[in-house]
Amino acid sequence: MPISKLQRVASSHRDPLSHVYKDQEGNIIRRITSETVNIIQNHNYFTQIEEPYKDLADYYKVKKIPFLSYYYEYPFNLLKDMALFYLDDLEDLVKTGNSLSDGTPFNCTYTGNKRFEFFDLGSIVPFDKNKGWEGYKQFITDFYYQLVYLSDLK
């Protein structure tokens, strides 16, 4: 199947290397490098890859997330759990020489049963010890400051 038969998901506009597509059957298709596939298969936090997609190199069918919840809907404890989940995910990646290119809570969602899922597969990058975590400022702004504000309301 040629890529022209896939419909790009409109909300997938920020990361040109990892766009999200739907095929005619409604399957979610991601463009993912083989290096990222190897990383994802060794971590439980990421959206799971189901199988390579037909004859397209670097395109994979991924598990569909039934619904997305957004961090600004969460009470304090759930937002805190999500922030800790994000840091745990980052720590596991750094142990393998990888990192996350950003620190936004829009990259993951709460899926119920005390489980979060990280779905921005395109933000997995090699870790550069000279730069540190590129998403640190964004994490502080989007997670930490929100938690400080919410903790004052308790």
Image (cartoon, rainbow, N blue to C red):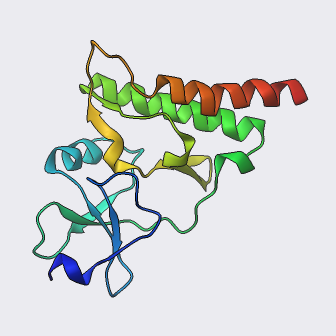
Q: Is residue 147 left or right of residue 125?
A: right
Rendered residue at 86%/24% (across/down): 152
Q: Residue furthest top?
A: 130
Q: Quadrant of residue 146?
A: top right
Q: In the drawing, does residue 103 fall left or right of residue 24?
A: right
Give the total of numbered labels: 0
65 lies above or below 15: below
Q: Residue furthest bottom?
A: 24
Question: Residue 95 placed where, x, y %?
Answer: 30, 23
The reply, left or right, for residue 97 in relation to residue 121 is left
Quadrant location, the N terminus: bottom left
The residue located at (31%, 81%) in the rendering is: 23
Q: Who is closer to the viewer here, 144 or 138? A: 138
Report x, y in % for residue 137: 52, 23
Residue 60 horizontal/vertical position (percent)? 23, 65
Residue 154: tell me if it is visible.
no
* Residue ID at (53%, 30%): 138
Q: Provide residue 31's location: percent of width, then percent of height.
A: 24, 60
